[in-house]
Amino acid sequence: MKIVVIGSGFGGLAAAIRLRAQGHEVTVVEQRDKPGGRAYVYEQDGFTFDAGPTIITAPWLIDDVFSVAGKRTADYVRIVPIDPFYRIRFEDGSVFTYNGDREALLRQIRAFEPRDEQGYLRFLRKSEEVFETGMALIDKPFHELGSMVRMLPDLIRLRADRSVAGMANAFIRDERLRQVFSFHPLLVGGNPFKTTSIYTLIHHLEQKWGVWFAMGGMGKLVEGFARCLTDIGGTLRLSTRVEEIVVDERTGRATGVRLAGGEVLHADAVVSNGDVGFTYKHLIAERFRRKWTDARVDGLDYSMSLFVLYFGTDRKYEDIAHHEILMGPRYKALLEDVFDAKVLAKDFSLYLHRPTATDPSLAPAGCDAWYVLSPVPHLGGPTDWATAAKPYRDAIVRYLEERYLPGLSQHIVTERMIDPVHFRDVLSSHLGAAFSVQPTLFQSAWFRPHNRSEDIPNLFFAGAGTHPGAGLPGVISSGKIVADLIGPAANPAAGRRPAARPEPAGVA
């Protein structure tokens, strides 16, 4: 089969590699000048900035993609563990260092609130229980109602109706510790007070297997996937924008994609790694969409967006970890502003990324590369980013300078920033949502946009907006789901299939 994959994010590349290994003729088309999608890389003034994801969990999923192609992770990228995973700082000056050292975590919990030690251990056991059920389903499709019905007893038993914050709060008393053990949904675009408690599995995942980083930046992992695809005979076309998924009027099946400029790439199947809402609304004529009408797309609840400032400093801040979570004065109320009221608050909680703590090569000698990220409402709210971006940037820099990075404004030597308009106009994300569809209970599994389109039978979806959801494990697994749904080529000999699958190896 000829297959066109729209978008070269991790989900699209993972699907493309698997499909090529199955013997299909695969072409990936990417609208930007580099692969990666949200995992784009900016290089300026000697600094390297990962534009998007920075955290690797479940590294065996990466190994498996390379292994399917007969390759080894270590031949393409070096992945190293990080300690601490995160350092979480609070307005009162208290700090929680979050890593995989059980005794160290318990000591810190006792220092915050002695009664929470046993509560945390119960929370940990619940997280493990959720992991055992939830992780087994991460690469299984939910395009049939029966698959959801079969899962209902487990969802009831695991209290999937609770939110992640609700689960943490049921076991833990101290408000700061509640935040420590419930913030993870924000990493995949969810409100901790609305994201289903199934996502507590992230805690067990990190505790058992750690948090990892790709040396040279996450862009090196993108490059590795892209090179692996071309090494096994796949095609990657950059600066190639899709304007339409062509659908046959008689059969209702996709026959290819029409590019900007008019060229048509014919295909037996199309995989969209683009934003689900954007794909349905802007790439497919509505007459072909009985289920995914514009109204249905608009009726979904979408993730927050992001304001991100990338900057380089001409000095190093050695007391700042690779990943820092800077909790502001409000938690639940701020999230209500972002997700519900969709207003830009004057206060914020921030994710501060300093990759040069692990890999100094990402900045000139004696310098640090950074980004600081603030969750903000998507474009469904009233904020005018043409006027709001610069004051918001200044407020964040001032906050960092006053509390964590002394003299920052005098030491910034290069910078760039993105806001929700960037997600809409550059990344083609509906409403400028940074993570597509929110991971609430009734927007998960079967309720989430399916990996196989209900409207067009040979259109498939990989990426954050479909099952299983955002985050590196989720989008890579969505690529496997798509490849499994399409299946091996009818004539595998026509493809370049690997002779053997070596054991996964690539972490160090």
Image (tube, grey):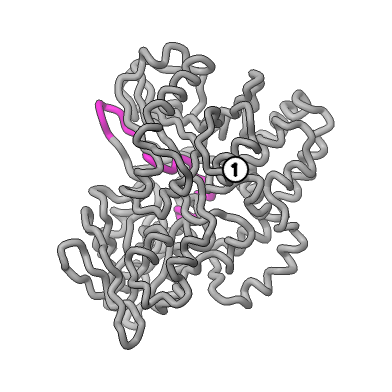
Which residue is rendered at x = 73% and y = 32% of the image? 175
| The one of 238 and 362 positioned closer to us in this rendering | 238
Q: Position of residue 432 (x, y in %)?
A: 41, 48
Q: Is residue 307 left or right of residue 119?
A: left
| The one of 66 and 375 positioned closer to us in this rendering | 375
Which residue is rendered at x = 42% and y = 11% of the image? 407
Looking at the image, can residue 1 be seen? no
Q: Quadrant of residue 65?
A: bottom left
Q: Quadrant of residue 180?
A: top right
Looking at the image, can residue 179 be seen? yes
Under mark 1, the amino acid is His
| The one of 56 and 36 positioned closer to us in this rendering | 36
**In the rendered view, would you say 281 is above or below 167?**
below
Which residue is rendered at x = 24% and y = 62% of the image? 235
Q: Position of residue 311 (x, y in %)?
A: 36, 26
Where's the N terminus, which quadrant?
bottom left
Q: Which residues are magenta?
A: 43-63
Identify the residue position indicated by label 1 in the image. Answer: 184
Q: Is residue 264 left or right of residue 499?
A: left
Q: Position of residue 11 (x, y in %)?
A: 41, 58
Q: Position of residue 275 (x, y in %)?
A: 40, 58
**Which residue sits furthest front?**
382
Q: Is residue 190 left or right of residue 28?
A: right
- The image shows a total of numbered marks equal to 1
**In the rendered view, would you say 452 is above or below 207?**
below
Q: Is residue 390 magenta?
A: no
Q: Secondary structure at mark 1?
A: helix
